[in-house]
Amino acid sequence: MALSSKHILGMEHLSRQDIFKILSLAKQFKKQKKLPSTLKGKIVFNLFFEPSTRTQTSFEIAAKKLGATTIHINTAQSSTVKGETLSDTARTIEAMNPDVIVIRHPSSGAPYLLSKILKTPVINAGDGFHEHPTQALLDILTIEETKGRLADLRVLIVGDIAHSRIARSDIYGLTKMGAKTLVCGPPTLIPPFIEKLGVKVFYHLKEAVKETDVIIMLRIQKERHNQLQFPSYREYIKKYCLNLETLKYAKSNVMIMHPGPLNRGVEIAPEIADGPYSVILNQVSNGIVIRMALLHLMTNGEHLGTAH
Amino acid sequence: MALSSKHILGMEHLSRQDIFKILSLAKQFKKQKKLPSTLKGKIVFNLFFEPSTRTQTSFEIAAKKLGATTIHINTAQSSTVKGETLSDTARTIEAMNPDVIVIRHPSSGAPYLLSKILKTPVINAGDGFHEHPTQALLDILTIEETKGRLADLRVLIVGDIAHSRIARSDIYGLTKMGAKTLVCGPPTLIPPFIEKLGVKVFYHLKEAVKETDVIIMLRIQKERHNQLQFPSYREYIKKYCLNLETLKYAKSNVMIMHPGPLNRGVEIAPEIADGPYSVILNQVSNGIVIRMALLHLMTNGEHLGTAH
Amino acid sequence: MALSSKHILGMEHLSRQDIFKILSLAKQFKKQKKLPSTLKGKIVFNLFFEPSTRTQTSFEIAAKKLGATTIHINTAQSSTVKGETLSDTARTIEAMNPDVIVIRHPSSGAPYLLSKILKTPVINAGDGFHEHPTQALLDILTIEETKGRLADLRVLIVGDIAHSRIARSDIYGLTKMGAKTLVCGPPTLIPPFIEKLGVKVFYHLKEAVKETDVIIMLRIQKERHNQLQFPSYREYIKKYCLNLETLKYAKSNVMIMHPGPLNRGVEIAPEIADGPYSVILNQVSNGIVIRMALLHLMTNGEHLGTAH
């Protein structure tokens, strides 16, 4: 039952079959009242070079729920402030004999680097503008459990597509699972040649929402932009904030997602975030079972049968 | 055996009967050599928006002693730095399915807000100038176990009464348990109308200590005052520091308390803090059993009987 | 099987017999596939007043591997920012009833102070320029398992000897175990009178490496020096960086150590750090079993026999 992929670095190279395995186990964990301690005695190392609440906490809870010990290192207290290279930090951690290393890093490719020099399985918890595969997996699970399927769904992603690792991972993952992806945002925030991935591009939100089954609103990451990529927030909000007015153009059974944390009134209106179409909190809950499934599959994959 | 109150937001609205239940279970935990793992599989979420060593650590130890998993979030690493509202942070945490949320927040009423929007039990670990109920409960336990009773004791609280959430919680709690509360401090630091709560006000420490059984010295919270509320530290120390000279006016069996951390030589002289009347370290120990009792009562309350 | 020493404050006063016991148990833990939970129900308090990744993480993993609960306090969140004295912080922690307190502190002698006022066993995890005994113990274990013995080995320590707590602890420990210690560095970084400890002093690296069996390269701690103790980094690197050129003068079976984190290209050339003589990562692994052995011996020392 183990995955064919040793590391989880991105959705681009994760196989359809591995995705099915992960989703299937996550759904099984979700139904179980009493969880098996399949990770008892195992050590999950969370190595976070960027601040994160929900992803780090989600991994921590997932690991502990299966009985693992978690070790958390963030850069503030890390040797990297003492000038250590990422490779040396990684090798030092591996010498402590962990069972999985979860890494978030501001540089695209940092998890890949680790996977090349370490024997320990590595999970990418977000790297620069590259990928955030566990977010894509929880998004896929949330869509599938709400809509009952993935094939032929039209999923629209709205916002700063060019700098979003979530957008990249969602596009790779959803396309692989048979969904059709669409993106919408200011021309400066849409990467060139994205159509080559099979993505349809829109610049007007009202038009984009018309034929979509799922809308994923990306967060405007104020803390990442040294300078605005668009004329003004006011302008952005006017054109790309999802509100009741825009939603009138959407299907009556559209579902609304957001990876969080929310900028209420910027990319999403409060009445949408808290409204009946929103599955934002389901995404958070699903994040835990997705990460449980991954940790289980990447560290043993065999004992589960005996425990439930 | 569960409490009538689902959340612990303050002493003002906690019933006498609930206080008795908490004290009783805390005393039972204190006597037990081997603790039952009544919180095994449960998750206690510590959400701290203000730095804290003793309160946070005390909750962490209490939870772990009963077998719970603890998750700690402080603002430095939190999404709140990314502009998330407190409500959204709280809802996100609840979507991760914790069993109790412990919150410390600089704004009075933050725990109340959480209790209104969440289904998870909430414990106030200190909110602004409002309340700090677990401190009051551990103070009450410490007084009762030292004096053998609470009824008709005269308990004096000295310091910045106006800005102290501990003073408020102690006054509510002690009054409810039949003790008589007195306060002493500079006129600018005594809230108006406090006599309406049944509190007697003093401005001179030597006079105030005369008929008291218990003296609670509050900490001068330098880090909270943007400007001093009194002419000078020197003046404050001269008038309100508890020292051997002042203690001559007190009863021979007076007991001295302080919530910590101490400003030695400011509000309390070292020889008093380390002297025979001081029960300051008992307060720390009692903090753990009080929090164990609360966590137990708020999450299940039924399995204890089988385990001891 | 308990140690004769209640606290582990430094190698200077640790007995040879205690060192043998610690090494022996560490080796036993290293061989065991399934570790006994001999610290179940015990609390290990990590009190770190200086940032540290490897030492703190190593203690945390060691404690958790034996089933202990760990509590971590670092100064950023600590009451010390509120002006509490170290003694009061220590007494407060002891009132929470921990089983061992591990302390790292920028002031030499801080762990000693704790050992004088507390009943709880104290482990020094590095204090100022004084000692770092667990590093010395893991170094000794690494040397012994690589060389098969300690007696009569010549161990060279290179770098800022004057300000290195690791150098001090290694010199005390290795001398006690029968090895001969040598040091090499710029004259300004060699403490006066060090020969009185039986240490041989060199100022030229090529000469120093000639007859040595083990070379321990110290890290240049840029973050500790307010001003350089030597003319320039360039000059330092030219004279004291261990590289392939220098290594030609050494024995063919010399082993190379470094406590980490590495400044590649400053005190050690990358090809040496990653080369066949380097046991740097073994040091990291051994750090965990050494700390497991210490924690076990200092908290109970009796149950191990029944568990393996």
Image (cartoon, coloured by chain):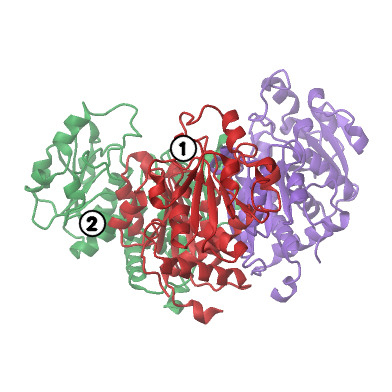
Chain colours: A purple, B green, C red
Label 1 packing within 10 angstroms: few (<14), some (14-19), many (20+): some
Q: Which chain carries label 2?
A: B
Image spot of residue A101 (x, y percent): 68, 53
Q: Which residue is drawn at 76% across and 70% down?
A: A302
Return the x and y of residue A243 as percentages of the image width and height: 71, 32
In the rendered image, residue C34, in percent from the top left (x then y), is placed at 61, 73
Q: Mark 2 points at which residue?
A: B279
- Decide which of A77, A130 is in the foreground and name it: A77
Quadrant that contains the N terminus of chain B: bottom left
| Residue at mark 2 shares a chain with residue at mark 1 | no
Q: Residue A165 carries which label?
A: none
Q: Label 1 sits on what residue type? A: Leu
Q: How crowded is mark 2: few (under 14 residues within 10 Å), some or many (20 or more)?
A: some
Q: Residue furthest left?
A: B249
Tag in front: 2 or 1: 1
The quadrant of the rendering that contains the C terminus of chain B is bottom left
Q: Taking C140 as reference, is C36 above or below it?
A: below
Contact flag, marks 2 and 1 (Cβ < 8 Å): no
Q: Quadrant of residue A193?
A: top right
Position of residue A306 measured from the top left corner of the image (x, y, whole percent): 72, 76
Residue occupying image coordinates x 41% and y 74%: B34
Which sits in the foreground, B106 or A302?
A: A302
Q: Which mark is residue C189?
A: 1
